[in-house]
Amino acid sequence: MMARVNQFLEELIAFRDDAHLAAWQGYEENGHAREVLTYLWVEKQAVLGIIHQSLSYRGFSLEDTLSAASELIRKGWVSREGDLLRITPFGREIRRTIEATTDRYYFTPLICFSTSDLEQTEELIKEFRKGMPIMDM
């Protein structure tokens, strides 16, 4: 049963990823530029080296990060003062719009469920959790 629950949750995560990529469709940004913008959306500002270091697990070079940042600056989504990069108000609005669009795409299929359907599902999940053994780590 746990394998089925895990598979279902992984499919929900993949569906959200698809919704997020669809939300970015009209903005013609590469994946790394999206990551840089998102980093600045969360942190507000950072130096390029810190952004690169934080996103290094994605496998991009420092040159790739500089290129992505330069593209965001060219579009007016990010500003640069010396080594410091800041998300602009326009960049924040773009990123907020992306997140709202992602949520709209992700949650729209769920509106067909009634409140009682969702409450029943929540109760079933709670009952399922009660039956799970507690494992020591």
Image (spheres, rainbow, N blue to C red):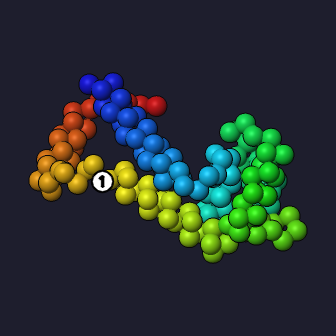
Left or right of residue 70, residue 90 in this image:
left
Above or below — where is 88 with respect to 125?
below
Residue in view at x 43 percent, y 59 percent = 101
Where does residue 86 sit, x and y in percent of width and height? 73, 68
Residue shown at the point (43%, 38%) measured from the top left: 14
Residue, far bottom: 89
| Residue at (68, 52) in percent of width and height | 33
* Residue 109 in view here: yes
Residue 135 drawn above or below residue 43: above
Residue situated furthest left in the rendering = 116
Closer-to-camera residue (81/116): 81
Residue 59 placement (x, y as % from top left): 73, 36
Q: Position of residue 88 (x, y in %)?
A: 67, 72
Question: At 27% across and 49% down in the image, what residue appears?
Answer: 109
Q: How many marks?
A: 1
Res 2 → quadrant: top left
Q: Residue furthest right?
A: 82
Rendered image quadrant of residue 5:
top left
Whether residue 113 sits left or right of residue 12 in the image: it is: left
Query: Which is more toward the observer, 128 or 38?
Result: 38
Amino acid type for the residue under numbered disc 1: Thr
Q: Relative to 81, does residue 128 appear above or below in the rendering?
A: above
Q: Is residue 130 visible?
A: no
Dot 1 falls on a residue whose secondary structure is helix
Q: Quickly name the residue at label 1.
A: 108
Q: Quadrant of residue 83?
A: bottom right
